[in-house]
Image (spheres, rainbow, N blue to C red):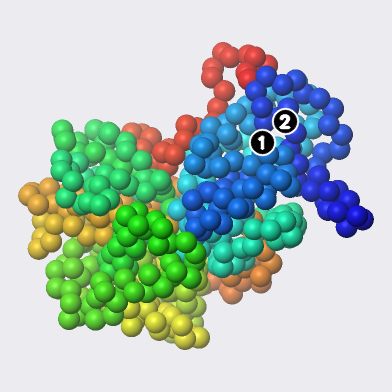
Amino acid sequence: MMSHMKSENVLKDFYLPDCLLLPGLEFQNVGRVPDCPVIVFINSKSGGQLGGELLITYRALLNKNQVFDLGERAPDEVLHKLYVTLETLKHNGNYFAAEIEKRLRIIVAGGDGTASWLLGVVSDLKLPKPPPIATVPLGTGNNLPFSFGWGKKNPGTDRQSVESFLYQVKTAKEMKIDSWHLIMRMKAPRDGSCEPIAPLELPHSLHAFHRVSKTDELNMEGYHTYRGGFWNYFSMGMDAQVSYAFHSERKLHPEKFKNQFMNQSTYLKLGCTQGWFCASLVHPASRNIAQLTKVKIMKKPGQWEELLVPSCIRSIVCLNLPSFSGGLNPWGRPTGRKVRDRDLTSPYVDDGLLEIVGFRNAWHGLVLLSRNGHGTRLAQANRVLFEFRKGATNHTYMRIDGEPWKQPLPVDDETVTIEISHFGQVNMLARPSCRSQSVYDPSSPASPREEDDDTNSNEEESSEDSEERSKFGAAKSFKFPDRVDISQLS
């Protein structure tokens, strides 16, 4: 009995009242401000049945109206309404609302794609004080949760497990990480040659934007621009092909993907059947990265340079966090001569740089399991540009933060370009044991690189090009309309 009462008191630290969550309710005196108010978003379809079970437990422990099923409510809608309510109450001098906004934390339960979706929404809304985000690992790879100390195994869904996680959220530290903006320009395909996932069925974090800047050479009828963002990685080549096969199979036969172990076993099997372990024998050289695309990188604003990719590389990864493919670290920690001669640093999550790594095949990837193993370190850069022209193949495979797609490539005198650039930062919640490191953390290995004050700027960008990069596309920016009385907003 005493244990249950103690638990109830603890859960009040995370509780949000209905007067902040439901429309039309007047604010009531709800007592003390909770220490760690949370909004919970759960992908009920993730983790087999675990997502649904987790939804039930959270709703039983907290106010059911502060726990949302992402299959039923869009996160941008939920957060926009909540922050309009908070800002309205703050405008009227409400101390409770001001403290809730200051202390609010977000919990998102799902795979890496779900977590990235939430990160995109929070970035796009441009909230007055963006809440930090904790991730519950419900996917297959769970690279984002693992990077910040939340583990990579699917969690328990019972009351005790959820209470333990809530306590960890309350004591977690905030950590800023880089956001990366992606713009893809291509001629929109007219047919469905990329079934079973259609050509334009892109990940949550890529969104159609049917305009290119007037100064762009691709400013012609029939071309579309897609934009989005990522926080963990962008990859292209054989690893994305295996991921695409996995997602296609899961879409066709969801009943076969009920738990993390079965998913990982299927993933390994597909890696074998797709020829990832014997790539040099099964896959033609035309699928190698150097044959598919020209790669350019920018280390200093306005200075593009061509990146020479070895001809044997069949997979390329632009990495922001030190976790890929279920917790592996492809970049490792460069030391000695490699740091001095090649100007390489350890992988920091907030230094405005992407680590670009290449792999020959799956055997090369297995090197990561050794203590000092790493992929082929190609470069570190603030911006990356991929240019595709007509070649020996009409498609390739790409992936951002766990979500793959089959990308059509030029068949005539067309061009497909993908440009990745730094785009601000977001707040994550991290446990003390996390492997992610900040360049500003005194306990992190010293970085030999002198950071430029204008790393994230590019004075040559046109105003229209800047507009393209003004958001990821997942949600409308948060702001109150001009000449609108804030007290009348609901």
Q: Quadrant of the C terminus?
A: top right
Q: Residue at x 47, y 77 (%)?
A: 332
User: Dividing the picture into quarters, in which one does residue 472 lie?
Assistant: top left
Q: Amino acid at mark 2?
A: Asp
> Residue extending furthest right?
2
Q: Label 1 belongs to which residue?
A: 65
Q: Label 2 belongs to which residue?
A: 18
Q: Is residue 224 left or right of residue 322?
A: left
Mark carried by residue 401: none
Q: Residue 3 location in percent, x, y?
A: 88, 57
Q: Residue 473 location in percent, x, y?
A: 41, 38
Q: Does the CB distance between marks 2 and 1 fall below 8 Å?
A: yes
| Residue 465 seen in the current view | no
Q: Residue at x 32, y 60 (%)?
A: 249
Q: Is residue 449 left or right of residue 106?
A: left
Q: Secondary structure at mark 1?
A: helix
Q: Residue at x 49, y 51 (%)?
A: 45
Classify mark 1: residues with Cα within 10 Å, few (<14), some (14-19) or many (20+): some
Classify mark 2: residues with Cα within 10 Å, few (<14), some (14-19) or many (20+): some
User: Dividing the picture into quarters, in which one does residue 216 lie?
Assistant: top left
- Whether residue 462 is situated above or below residue 250 in the rendered picture: above
- Whether residue 25 is situated above or below residue 12 in the rendered picture: above
- Whether residue 490 is situated above or below residue 258 in the rendered picture: above
Q: Nearer the viewer, residue 104 or 202?
A: 202
Q: Nearer the viewer, residue 478 or 399?
A: 399
Q: Residue at x 65, y 14 (%)?
A: 488
N-terminal-most mark, 2 or 1? 2
Residues at marks 2 and 1, CA–CA distance in whole angstroms: 7 Å
Q: Amino acid at mark 1?
A: Asn
Q: Is residue 427 left or right of residue 295?
A: right
Q: Secondary structure at mark 2?
A: helix
Q: Residue 290 location in percent, x, y?
A: 20, 68
